[in-house]
Image (cartoon, rainbow, N blue to C red):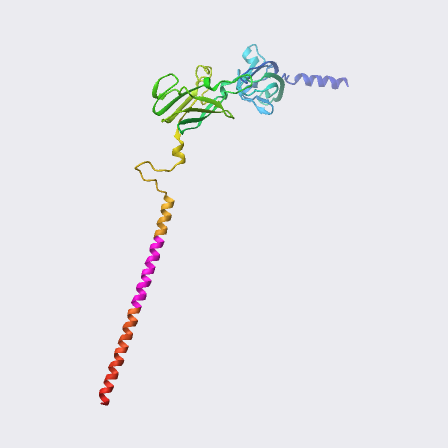
């Protein structure tokens, strides 16, 4: 029994010692990011590109501060910090995080390990990554201009909402000159002073203003740089910061009436139908005329034959009378 114990103890000693990664520190930010640091305890390497960060069953996208982690006097090898992308931890709750990784001892010895820990978040306040801007529609109708705009990211949380009047900047081009809210008269500039913007639903806003005897030809809208200065185009190149759209008039869309002095636009389908109808009528008329001509020709032939027969009969009768007399 003692011999078996000695052999087992010796076998354990020759096995490579495996000390998995341990949790060191974490924090949750109001832009929806989580940052945590883990520490390596042995010479076994854990390559960060192969570490899976999982929360609520989802893979979390982010960046590591080191290429691999191992026990070392060099801090950026012993400690590895992971920074997630923004707007991934938006709820006010405690998130469970799992690290699924592999410790590599040598070319033939690998150990699959997991590390579990929790991070408490207070909920998102604002993230530049959620911004997105689109003009859905814009038109002038009955001396009134209307535009529907989707501005994602102005209502990201209950703790913070951004007023669309301050968050958005506009530029319009009109058919005739108008006076904008900067008191400048031009056919291109800011919105008129009598405009209004109100929230509809699903991040959609409606912009309206009276525009008597005028119409908007195009509209440009962008996020206000003064408010969203941290949301630079260089850092958030994937965010749609602005939009430009040509606008229409409802009269053009709903009416097919011709302009004064200009003939109405012909309907190709209707024209084709009328052409086919005219051809049918023409063909029927031609057939009718041919039938009448054939009937008339037959009548003439029959009349001629009858006239010849009657003539021959009369001649025969006259000759018989001459013979008898």
Quadrant for residue 268, please give it: top left
Predominant secondary structure, magenta span:
helix
Which residue shows up at 34% across the image and 51% down it? 278
Q: Is residue 200 left or right of residue 24?
A: left
In this view, the residue in front, 277 or 30, is: 277
Which residue shows up at 35% across the image and 57% down it? 284
Which residue shows up at 66% across the image and 17% down it? 14
Q: Is residue 317 visible?
A: yes
Figure quadrant of the N terminus = top right
Does residue 325 sit above or below 192 in this rendering? below
> How many marks overall?
0
Which residue shows up at 28% across the image and 69% down it? 300
Quadrant for residue 42, please give it: top right
The image shows residue 85 at horizontal and vertical percentages of: 52, 19
Is residue 93 highlighted in magenta?
no
In this view, the residue in front, 237 or 18, is: 237
Quadrant for residue 15, please give it: top right
The extreme top residue here reads: 73
In this view, the residue in front, 255 or 116, is: 255
Does residue 191 sit above or below 269 in this rendering? above
The extreme right residue here reads: 1
The extreme bottom residue here reads: 325
The image shows residue 109 at horizontal and vertical percentages of: 60, 22
Q: Is residue 136 left or right of residue 23?
A: left
Q: Is residue 235 visible?
A: no
Q: Which residues are magenta?
A: 279-298
The image shows residue 314 at horizontal and vertical percentages of: 25, 81
Figure quadrant of the C terminus = bottom left
Is residue 285 highlighted in magenta?
yes
Does residue 125 sit above or below 322 in this rendering? above
């Amino acid at each position: 029994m003692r011999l078996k114990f000695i052999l087992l103890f010796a076998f354990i000693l020759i096995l490579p010692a495996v000390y998995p990664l341990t949790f060191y520190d974490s924090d949750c930010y109001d832009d929806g990011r989580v940052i945590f640091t883990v520490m390596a305890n042995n010479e076994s390497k854990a390559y960060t590109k192969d570490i899976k960060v999982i929360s609520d069953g989802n893979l979390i996208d982010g960046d590591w501060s080191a290429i691999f982690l191992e026990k070392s006097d060099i801090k950026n090898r012993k400690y590895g910090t992971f920074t997630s992308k923004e707007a991934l931890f938006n709820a006010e709750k405690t998130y469970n995080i799992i690290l699924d990784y592999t410790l590599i001892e040598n070319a033939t010895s690998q150990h699959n390990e997991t590390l579990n820990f929790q991070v408490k978040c207070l909920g998102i306040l604002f993230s530049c990554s959620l911004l997105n801007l689109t003009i859905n529609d814009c038109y002038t109708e009955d001396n009134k201009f209307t535009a529907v705009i989707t501005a994602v990211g102005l209502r990201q949380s209950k703790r913070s909402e951004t007023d669309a009047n301050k968050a958005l900047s506009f530029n319009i081009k009109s058919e005739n000159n108008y006076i904008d809210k900067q008191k400048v008269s031009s056919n291109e500039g800011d919105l008129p002073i009598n405009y209004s913007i109100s929230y509809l639903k699903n991040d959609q806003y409606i912009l309206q203003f009276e525009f008597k005897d005028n119409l908007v030809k195009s509209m440009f809208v962008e996020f206000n740089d003064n408010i969203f200065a941290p949301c630079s185009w260089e850092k958030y190149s994937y965010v749609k910061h602005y939009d430009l759209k040509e606008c229409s008039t409802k009269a053009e869309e709903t009416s097919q009436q011709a302009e004064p002095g200009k003939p109405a636009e012909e309907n190709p389908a209707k024209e084709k139908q009328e052409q086919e109808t005219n051809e049918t009528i023409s063909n029927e008329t031609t057939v009718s005329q041919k039938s009448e001509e054939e009937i008339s020709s037959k009548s003439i032939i029959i009349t001629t034959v009858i006239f010849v027969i009657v003539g021959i009969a009369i001649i025969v009768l006259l000759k018989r009378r001459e013979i008898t007399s």
